[in-house]
Amino acid sequence: MKLDKKDQQLIFELDQNSRQSINSIAKKTKLSRDVVNYRIKQLEKKKIINGYFALIDFNKLGYQAIRLYHWNYQKFFGEATHTKKFGKHSGNRLAI
């Protein structure tokens, strides 16, 4: 799917800080508040934006190692495939 320049700008701004206000994004993209709100809703509706999440710096929390889990469920919660991934946290990088 091709995105126009305005949608690309919105995605860039949300990628930089998804918690910023609609007003802040509108000022940075030079679009009206209503246009920004409408376009973000459309990107969510089209599943281009699938959600928002927190990026946690585990090093600042005092963790030296972390454990990651990845679950893959078949459609309608059929047979589940579980994969464990273990990683070592070193500075700001995660080695798996």
Image (cartoon, helix red, strand yellow):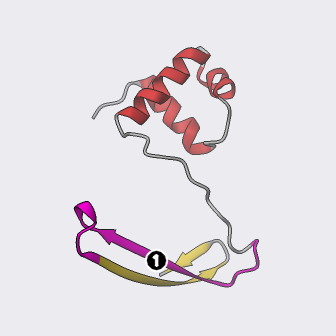
Give how far across and how far down residue 65 sits, in percent.
62, 85
Q: Which residue is mark 1?
A: 69
- Residue drawn at x 45%, y 32% is 8
Start and end of the magenta stretch?
Answer: 60-80
- Residue drawn at x 30%, y 31% is 2
Look at the image and tell me whether residue 31 can be seen.
no
Residue 18, image quadrant:
top right
Look at the image and tell me whether residue 42 can be seen.
yes
Check if residue 74 falls in the magenta segment.
yes
Mark 1 residue crowding within 10 angstroms, few (<14) / some (14–19) / many (20+): few
Quadrant of image for the N terminus: top left
Check if residue 67 falls in the magenta segment.
yes
Of the pair 77 and 60, the residue shown nearer to us: 77
- Residue drawn at x 56%, y 15% is 34
Horizontally, residue 88 falls left or right of residue 45, namely right
Residue 73, image quadrant:
bottom left
- Residue drawn at x 46%, y 24% is 39
Give how far across and how far down residue 53 sits, in percent.
56, 53
Q: How many marks?
A: 1
Secondary structure of the residue carrying numbered label 1: strand
Horizontally, residue 38 falls left or right of residue 64, namely left
Give how far across and how far down residue 83 sits, in percent.
36, 81
Of the pair 29 and 44, the residue shown nearer to us: 44
Give how far across and how far down residue 6 sits, in percent.
47, 23
Q: Is residue 30 above or below residue 62?
A: above
User: Looking at numbered disc 1 in the image, what kind of residue is underneath it?
Assistant: Tyr
